[in-house]
Image (cartoon, grey):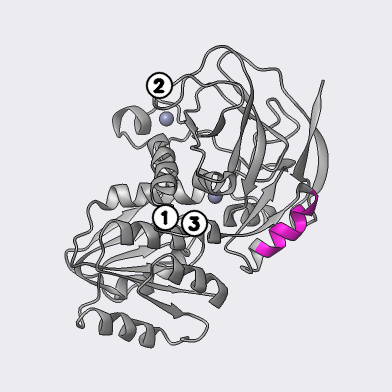
Amino acid sequence: METCRAAVITEHNKPLTIEQVPIPKLDQGSLLVKITASTLCGTDVHRWHGPLGDEDSLPIITGHEPCGYVEDIAGERTDILGNPVQRGDRIVWSYVACGSCYYCAVALQPCICPGRASWGHNRSDQHPFLLGSCAEYMYVPKECLIIKVPEDVTSASAAASACAYRTVMHGFDRLGAIKSHETVVIQGSGPLGNFATAVAKDHGAKKVLVIGAPANRLEVTKRMGADGVLNLEEVTDEKHRRNWVRDHTDGRGADVVIQVANNLAVPEGLTLLRGGGRYLNIAAGGKANIAVERIPQEMLFITIRSAEPRHWLQAIDFLASRRKSFPFEEMISKSYKLEQINEAMAAMASYSVVKAVINFN
Ligand SMILES: [Zn+2]
Ligand SMILES: [Zn+2]
């Protein structure tokens, strides 16, 4: 059996190792993709530190944000828009929901399908082996929807659209229209926060205010169009942060608050929201006791998990069509080779980069 190189977590909190992993034989409708870029995500770091669920068992190939070239296809495939997919096409591809459970078929909420397949936590010693993105090749199951990447979107940005950016698009989809008089506050200045800043500006918010850290990430936030940023490390008193938002909103609080840090930020976030506002909780995976003194009256609370296939397309479209308005490439702070995976993971863990990318060329 042929093999390829992959960055494997064999033990939690121990350095990842570069291993040879089998390249599986393709079954009908599946694809083999030669990875060109894999961006890293906070989730990869969390998973390296310990299992995120019962199904996380080692060894796993880290990474779930791939972009690559079609190396081989078993049979005929079309992309999400119905165009034929060919060898050599540069693509990203969606996660797979089962399509037949209560969440998929009745509730139409496929992102919480219990049988949903996703990447970056699958055993690398079991068929089909290559379901993590920090590897020279990935296996694409036949159920995945395929999105072609236009020429003017870089592979690194396309890779980031496979998790961070499409999740943000899902959030804005559920949030609905932002009115031109509305102020949006974003909690968090990582890749999700910075991308959300661009989308909120693009969708017509009057003002976008971002509370985050560290300073290097907030510099990027400003260039993504934020009207104001507040450094959590400098303004450590929650009361002062609340006053900052009130000062910007005639004392009312924000019309929309978007949480993209972690659930611990929710209690503070609710104090930044005006009565009747909308709270969009995107980074909702982490555990937290959410104790609040008061819930804003008539507010709407929306939580987001992952995304549906069309949000992958929306993210790629946004990167292509708004590339002159926003410096997306600045969110990809640093490029590493596969052999430097431990350096890249450490950079993500310390927040010294907005996003790290493993480049394979
Ligand atoms: Zn992710
Ligand atoms: Zn399902």
Magenta residue span:
339-347
Q: Which residue is mark 2?
A: 82
Residue 163 rendering spot, x and y as whole percentages: 51, 47
Vertical order, 6 against 211 (above or below): above
Sequence-earlier tag: 3 or 2: 2
Three-letter residue code for mark 2: Gly
Residue 188 in view, yes or no: no
The kind of secondary structure element at disc 3 is: helix
Three-letter residue code for mark 1: Lys
Vertical order, 238 against 209 (above or below): below
Residue 168 as seen in the image, left or right of residue 149? left
Which-is-in-front pick, marks 3 and 1?
1
Q: Quadrant of the C terminus?
A: top right
Residue 28 rendering spot, x and y as whole percentages: 58, 13
- Residue 324's disc is 1
Secondary structure mostly seen in magenta is: helix
Residue 348 as seen in the image, left or right of residue 209? right
Spatial CA distance of label 3 from label 2 is 28 Å
Which of the 4 image quadrants contains residue 133?
top right
As rendered, which of 193 and 263 lies closer to the eye?
Answer: 193
The kind of secondary structure element at disc 1 is: loop
At a point 64% along the width and 50% down the height, the residue shown is 51
269 magenta-colored: no
Q: Crowdedness of circle 3 by 10 Å Cα count: few (<14), some, many (20+)?
A: many
At a point 49% along the width and 46% down the height, the residue shown is 161
Which of the 4 image quadrants contains residue 67?
top right
Q: Which residue is mark 3?
A: 328
Residue 8 rendering spot, x and y as whole percentages: 76, 44
Task: Tell whether label 2 touches label 3 (CB within 8 Å).
Answer: no
Residue 88 rendering spot, x and y as whole percentages: 61, 26
At a point 38% along the width and 42% down the height, the residue shown is 314
